Amino acid sequence: HPSVGSFSDTDIEAACLLGLKKTIVVDEKYRYTMQPANENVFSPDMWKNIKNSFNETYLKVRGELSFARSKGQISEQNFEEMLDHMTWQRSTKSCGLKYTREKYIPHSDNYVIDNI
């Protein structure tokens, strides 16, 4: 995945347009997966609901993390790493999606689910 962190909105829009069953991105620390919770496939009709939920949740999470950063509770790097992950973690439930983040161990089939 070209960026560090979770899915971009473009990643999920593509999954919807292509009718994928599951989408996965990997960065240097984590493996992220997303799929419809009902064992269905992504569909173009799903995208509007997903995008609206993501955008609403993004503003709330950004505010929370900005406050934590201003108080010195998290670093700029933590802010960037956590923003999309926390947004997807909160917004996908209302859209009927299953989202996971697992610690990535290069050259291994072992992943540890991270519910942070």
Image: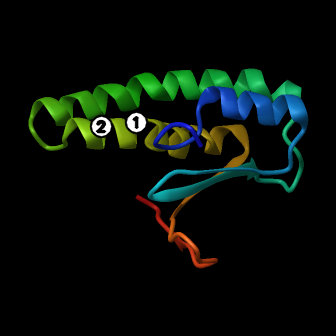
| Residue 105 or residue 68, whichever sits in front | 105
Q: In this view, does 69 lie to the left or right of 28?
A: left
Vertical placement of 59 versus 106: above or below?
above
The residue that mark 1 highlights is: 83
- Residue extending furthest front? 107
Q: Position of residue 93 (x, y in %)?
A: 63, 45
Q: Is residue 104 left or right of residue 34?
A: left
Amino acid type indicated by mark 1:
Leu
What secondary structure is found at the residue carrying circle 2?
helix
On residue 50, the disc is none
Q: Position of residue 110 (x, y in %)?
A: 58, 79
- Image point 51% across, 42% down: which residue? 90
Q: What crowding class fits label 2: few (fewer than 14 Cα within 10 Å), some (14-19), or many (20 or more)?
A: some
Q: What crowding class fits label 1: few (fewer than 14 Cα within 10 Å), some (14-19), or many (20 or more)?
A: many
Vertical placement of 85 versus 54: above or below?
below
- Image point 67% across, 26% down: which residue? 10
Q: Where is residue 1 in the image (x, y as percent from the top left)?
A: 59, 43
The residue that mark 2 highlights is: 79
Do labels 2 and 1 touch, CB within 8 Å? yes
Task: Name the colour scheme.
Answer: rainbow
Amino acid type indicated by mark 2:
Phe
Vertical placement of 24 versus 104: above or below?
above
Q: Where is residue 114 in the image (x, y as percent from the top left)?
A: 47, 65
The alpha-carbon separation of the residues under discs 2 and 1 comes to: 6 Å
Q: In this view, does 90 lie to the left or right of 40?
A: left
Vertical placement of 54 versus 109: above or below?
above
